Amino acid sequence: MTHDFEGRTEKEAIEKAMLELGLERDNFDVEILEAQRGGIFKKGYVKIRLHTDEAPKSNQTRPRERNTVSAGTETESEGVTNSEFEKKLVEFMRNVLEKMGTPGNVIIQNNERRKIVLEIQSADSAIIIGRKGRTLDALQLIATLYAKQIKHTEVRVMIDCEQYRKHHEEKLVRLAWSVAGRVRSQRRSYLMEPMNPSDRRLIHTTLDKESDLETKSEGDGTYKQIRVIYKHRR
């Protein structure tokens, strides 16, 4: 479940989210969607997205969502057909790759009601993916911001290249079980390397049903660390 909030700073936006949703800080991950530094004549601005598996405790009723992105239809509030949105997004990403000096083809790999996956095909795939997928993450953020700019605020955009996302998720799941085994054998917590919100969410989900383990996110900013904790039984 995701929720978007805004504030002058990341801290202010998070506090607004906690107040409105009634969630504790450890119960969600934060993804920064947009950030602008403040100046002498300009206020700072931060937009964040919360990722959580818990239902909000707030009693406030949210407006009924009207946006749909079914193929060939026009959404009530966006005024942009899905096919037009896809063309614009694909063309935009091709232009971004050209300006990076890594030209490539961009195709729609999957298009669901609220999620669209773009696959980049390029001879420079290693550069596009980047170290630990961070360049790919940056491209995904750029694509998400562009989608919001053309009023597709409810669509989650994902960017992949050479099936990196799939292989990366499989690697993360194996890592989660490896760390779990280490924590159980040593009876002590283990702090994993900093991860982005999506990777942390997968680790949390993988180990969520293990009754003798607990996972917590630690740190500030987008890249936080997960601590896997052994719960001693009496």
Image: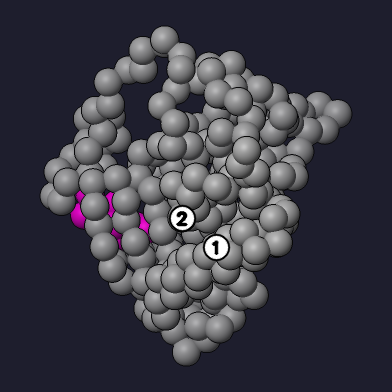
Q: Residues within 10 Å of mark 2 (few under 14, many from 20)?
A: some
Q: Magenta segment: does it hold 166?
A: no
Which residue shows up at 60% across the image and 25% down it? 24
Q: Amino acid at mark 2?
A: Thr
Q: Could you say where residue 222 lies in the image, as x and y percent from the top left?
A: 66, 48
What is the secondary structure assignment of the residue under circle 2?
helix
Instruction: Confirm or deny contact between disc 2 and disc 1 (CB under 8 A).
Output: yes
Which residue shows up at 32% across the image and 56% down it? 116
- Quarter assignment of residue 89: bottom left
On residue 176, the disc is 1
Give how far apart the Cα atoms at labels 2 and 1 are: 7 Å
What is the secondary structure assignment of the residue under circle 1?
helix
**Magenta region, mostly helix, strand or loop?**
helix
On residue 136, the disc is none
Q: Could you say where residue 84 lies in the image, as x and y percent from the top left?
A: 25, 53
Q: What residue is disc 2 on?
A: 206
Q: Amino acid at mark 1?
A: Ala
Q: From this viewpoint, is residue 139 visible?
A: no
Q: Which residues are magenta?
A: 81-89
- In the rendered image, the vertical position of residue 115 relative to residue 8, given as above or below: below
Most extreme residue toward the right is 40
- In the rendered image, the vertical position of residue 153 relative to residue 187, given as above or below: above
- Quarter assignment of residue 136: bottom right
Disc 2 or 1, which lies upstream in sequence? 1
Which residue shows up at 13% across the image and 49% down it? 72
Q: Could you say where residue 223 lies in the image, as x and y percent from the top left?
A: 68, 53
Nearest to the observer: residue 133 or residue 155? 133
- In the rendered image, the vertical position of residue 101 relative to residue 24, given as above or below: below
Q: From this viewpoint, is residue 104 visible?
A: yes
